[in-house]
């Protein structure tokens, strides 16, 4: 929109056909066809705000979860108190002035987080600041890892998935489950025991260990022993990778170990 949204294109020699009118038409058709990449792009260019955004921000703030929008070290802004729709529009406009896709995607993530904090508050234990820019980065990096995509391809893939899939990925990251469970179509953990953060990763490692012990319980041939030795190396790689992923995700989510602040406070006194 270099000429501005109110520029009259005089399309088909008709006055009043502004860039905004054409963009609104594209946005409407993208919504009807559920082309999410175009929905997000046009929504950002038109500075559209989700109806539930202000409520979601309030739900997070009243549960003592601060929010930052924008990319870290660049244009990040903190939201520490409830805001009106107009104030949020200004904040998002400053934070994503040159990124209309993230303008819309960040709103979707905040709305999803606001929904999850009401239905599954245990997912947010030991989290005090939600940095939306880092969350977008970690979701994109997980997509790149799983689907073996480049950074650019992963970003494009993230913009093309539905808001429901984005919410499922957020649930996966917050609960500590492997993102492969979501992308492979497995049902989310509604009604199941939810493990978050480090507890979930430990559970996954213990499950793999117990499975290998049960397999190795009987008498084995030499070739089977060789296979188990190879599996030992693979197991070490798996554990290293899963702990590395755990630390990266918890860092992006600003999640600290249980009782971290109380222990630090007691040590300082």
Image (cartoon, grey):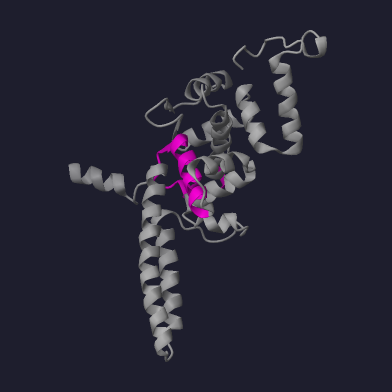
Q: Which residue sits at x=62%, y=12%?
A: 4
Does 233 appear above or below 81? Answer: below
Q: Residue furthest top?
A: 15
Is residue 50 visible to us here? no
Magenta-drawn stretch contains 190 = no
Front one among 155 and 169: 155
Residue plotted at (72% across, 33% down): 30
Q: Residue at x 30, y 48 (%)?
A: 260
**What is the quadrant of residue 216 in the picture?**
bottom left
Residue sitting at x 74%, y 28%: 28
Q: Nearer the viewer, residue 150 or 257?
A: 150
Which quarter of the rendering shows the N terminus? top right
Q: Is residue 142 magenta?
A: yes
> Which is the main secondary structure of the residues drawn in magenta?
helix
Q: Is residue 71 left or right of residue 22?
A: left
Q: Is residue 224 above or below residue 22?
A: below
Q: Quadrant of the C terminus?
A: top left
Horizontally, residue 43 falls left or right of residue 70, namely: right
Give the quarter of the image for residue 164: top right
Residue 14 placement (x, y as % from top left): 81, 10
Counting from the top left corner in percent of width and height, residue 215 is at 46, 82
The reply to whether residue 53 is in sight is: yes
Q: Which residues are magenta?
A: 118-146
Q: Nearer the viewer, residue 21 or 261?
A: 21
Q: Which quadrant holds residue 65?
A: top left
Q: Position of residue 255 (x, y in %)?
A: 38, 46
Question: How many labels were placed on the picture?
Answer: 0
Tell whether 233 sits left or right of 1.
left
Extreme residue toward the left, this view: 269
Q: Position of residue 265 (x, y in %)?
A: 24, 42
């Amino acid at each position: 929109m270099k000429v501005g949204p109110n520029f009259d294109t005089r399309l088909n020699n008709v006055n009043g056909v502004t860039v905004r009118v054409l963009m609104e038409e594209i946005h409407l058709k993208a919504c009807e066809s559920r082309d999410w990449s175009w929905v997000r792009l046009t929504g950002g260019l038109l500075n559209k705000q989700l109806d539930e955004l202000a409520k979601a921000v309030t739900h997070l703030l009243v549960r003592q979860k601060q929010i930052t929008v924008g990319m870290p070290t660049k244009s990040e802004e903190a939201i520490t108190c409830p805001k009106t729709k107009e104030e949020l529009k200004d904040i998002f406009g400053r934070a994503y002035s040159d990124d209309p896709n993230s303008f819309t995607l960040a709103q979707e993530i905040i709305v999803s987080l606001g929904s999850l904090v009401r239905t599954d508050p245990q997912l947010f234990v030991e989290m005090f600041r939600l940095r939306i820019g880092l969350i977008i980065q970690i979701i994109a990096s997980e997509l790149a890892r799983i689907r073996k995509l480049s950074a650019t391809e992963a970003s494009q893939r993230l913009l093309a998935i539905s808001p429901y899939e984005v919410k499922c990925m957020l649930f996966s990251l917050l609960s500590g489950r492997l993102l492969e469970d979501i992308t492979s179509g497995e049902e989310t953990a509604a009604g199941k025991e939810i493990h978050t953060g480090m507890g979930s990763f430990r559970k996954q490692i213990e499950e793999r260990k117990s499975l290998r012990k049960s397999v190795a319980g009987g008498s084995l041939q030499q070739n089977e022993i060789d296979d188990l030795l190879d599996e030992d190396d693979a197991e070490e790689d798996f554990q290293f990778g899963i702990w590395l992923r755990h630390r990266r995700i918890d860092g992006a989510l600003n999640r600290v170990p249980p009782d971290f602040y109380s222990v630090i406070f007691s040590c300082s006194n």
